Image (cartoon, helix red, strand yellow):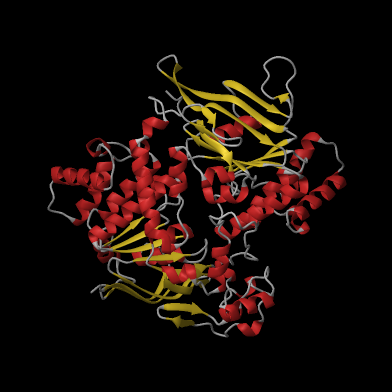
Amino acid sequence: MALLKVDDLKIHFPIRGGILNRKIDEVRAVDGVSFEVKEGQTYGLVGESGSGKTTTGKAIMGLNSITDGDIYFEDAHLNAKKGKKVDVRKDVQMIFQDPYSSLNPRKRVLDIVAEPFRNYEKMSKSEEKEKVKDLLERVGISKDSLFKYPHEFSGGQRQRIGVARAIALNPKLIIADEPVSALDVSVQAQVLNFLQDIQKDLNLTLLFIAHDLGVIKHMCDRIGIMYQGRLVEEGQKEDIFNNPQHIYTKRLVAAIPDVDPRRREEHQRFRAQVKEEYQQSFYDYFDENGMAHELRSISDTHKVALPERG
Amino acid sequence: MSKTLLEIKNLTTSFRIGEEYYAAVDDVSLNLQENEVLAIVGESGSGKSATAFSLMGLHNRAKIEGEILFKGRDIANLPASKMNKIRGNEISMIFQDPLTALNPLMEIGKQIGEVLLLHKKDMSKQERRDYSIQLLERVGLPRPERVVDQFPHELSGGMRQRVIIAIAIANKPELLIADEPTTALDVTIQAQILDLMRELKDDLNSGVILITHDLGVVAEMADRVAVMYAGQIVEIADVESLFVNPQHPYTRSLLSSVPATDFAQDRLHVIQGIVPSLKNLPREGCRFKERIPWIEDTAHEEDPQLHEISENHYVRCTCYQHFYFPEESKEEQANGVTES
């Protein structure tokens, strides 16, 4: 059963101009994206800047207005136009990229972490404090930190405070938008391990948005590769890394630096080869506007955006 | 054959906090040959960028001690008037963030023209423009004759970084310092920029100092690698020895905290504690000691020095001989040693 289902999602931003500030064109940030995330799974959305991965994440959170398409969370239609709007904000939480700007510098840790349940639950001051202490302990931050301010913590600690806030209401789905790209490798390792632990403990589902394929490979069960607002390939981790079919995926995989200097030349040759293939066969994989085709299944788990045969 | 381009001897760069000076770069000695890529790796606060900035003479109000011999001439603490003749000419730098390194109010052509104006005074305006176009073409920008009149905001991140590189190579520098040149870029663009840098280095036969925290980039680019921690070099070796046979606990920890490209590994190694701030750097004994508390105190040297453990492979402190990861038991470690 899918916890989250995104169906043909389209998000277009208007470009306004002229004397009357009318819409003269639009940016198709997300243009027909469909995928499902199963409960307990980690789904990775990968793409370069401008591919629409963050826009997709924000739309699920309700932070972007949706042009077309549907998002379902546990069968509740999130962007229903008629009828009652379902409020899932308790169940869906977000972890942001930059731990330096996502915590209010003028608030104490207590207020930052308690904010979600101040909005949703009625608690006395002492209950609140206890709950925050629990949460901090869970993310490995000392209980004495309640009255400290964000600047007193390191990057990794701040990211964990962000996680404490995200899990405060026992959400079912967490959207992590580039949660480690602002961190040093050793701190990155700490946050990744910690996300895995928390996921296991709380049976969370993770939508992991990142551009770093190494991190994605480490964290995710299923991966969707985005290019210019569309998915070009989707599959289990093994499908994507061992058997990439789309030329763009191949190019991304080839671009990951190899950490073994002994294979350097071999890797460079391979990359040059993929680059050549990319240039030669670009129009075999994209339509005349340079957009990806529709996804087609090539196995039970693996979908690739290839043109119709014939 | 190849000759020494740069020799850094006992470089110490200190910054003032309050009344006292604290060394961010502490007694660093390095050398670089022509056409060699030396990578300096470390986390934020390790002193790698401070080292690079010292070479370029870009620190304001810092105390710089030791010698920086560039082609045999000491350029440490050179007055600005003399340094300006070298900077952007014989030594140039590629910065991390191409958006902030370029002037948003100036056309690309003019920004390239600036370095030419400073160092090649006999060029006419038209010559500068033509040469700028050539440079843009050299770094692989499409339609250079158009780009030359564009502003930075009209270009993508990868294109901007190419412009930065064009500016850096304008005067065919002998030493190129690249401070996290691809950190702000997407992976496919990163691969292109690294290819370009490699190509240019061979063309110009220049030495490159590559500062980065990305071990993948190091493995792809470097000939030799220096690992820095808390202002000191803790290990220095050729790239293969460093990745295949890392010795210092910090190097080993760093390498095992990177998500590897195989599927086997499910836990990443986490280095305990945090990188100490400049003010709280342990100045005595092994600086990495407090982050590997399970290693006995006796394993460390009192005043850790760099030891040559094999040809051109240096490791600081003796603790590397006794180091093991807490995840693996001591016996396993011992077995591993006897087997190998």
Q: From where the camera sits, is residue A148 visible?
A: yes
Q: Residue at x 37, y 54 (%)?
A: A268
Spot occupied by residue A54 in the image (x, y as percentages of width and height) = 56, 36
The reply, left or right, for residue B34 in relation to residue A48 is: left
Residue B130: where, in percent of width, then height?
16, 43
Residue A118 % position (x, y): 79, 38
**Residue B335, image x, y percentages:** 64, 78
Q: Report the quarter where the N terminus of chain B lies.
A: bottom left
| Residue sticking out furthest to the front | A310
Where A256 sits versus B301, above or below? above
Residue at 56% over, 32% down: A55
Lateral position of residue B125 relative to residue A278, left or right: left
Is residue A177 found left or right of B216 in the rendered image? right
Q: Is residue A228 above or below residue A221?
A: above
Question: Does residue B101 appear in this view?
Answer: no
How many numbered markers are drawn? 0
Which of these two is toward me, A80 or A235?
A: A235
Q: Nearer the viewer, residue B61 or A263?
A: A263
In-image side of B5 versus B53 (left or right): left
Return the residue nearer the eye: A106 or B190: B190
- A116 w.r.t. A264: above or below: above
Q: Residue at x 45, y 78 (%)?
A: B314
User: In the rendered image, which quarter is residue B268 located in?
Assistant: bottom right
Quadrant of image for the C terminus of chain B: bottom right
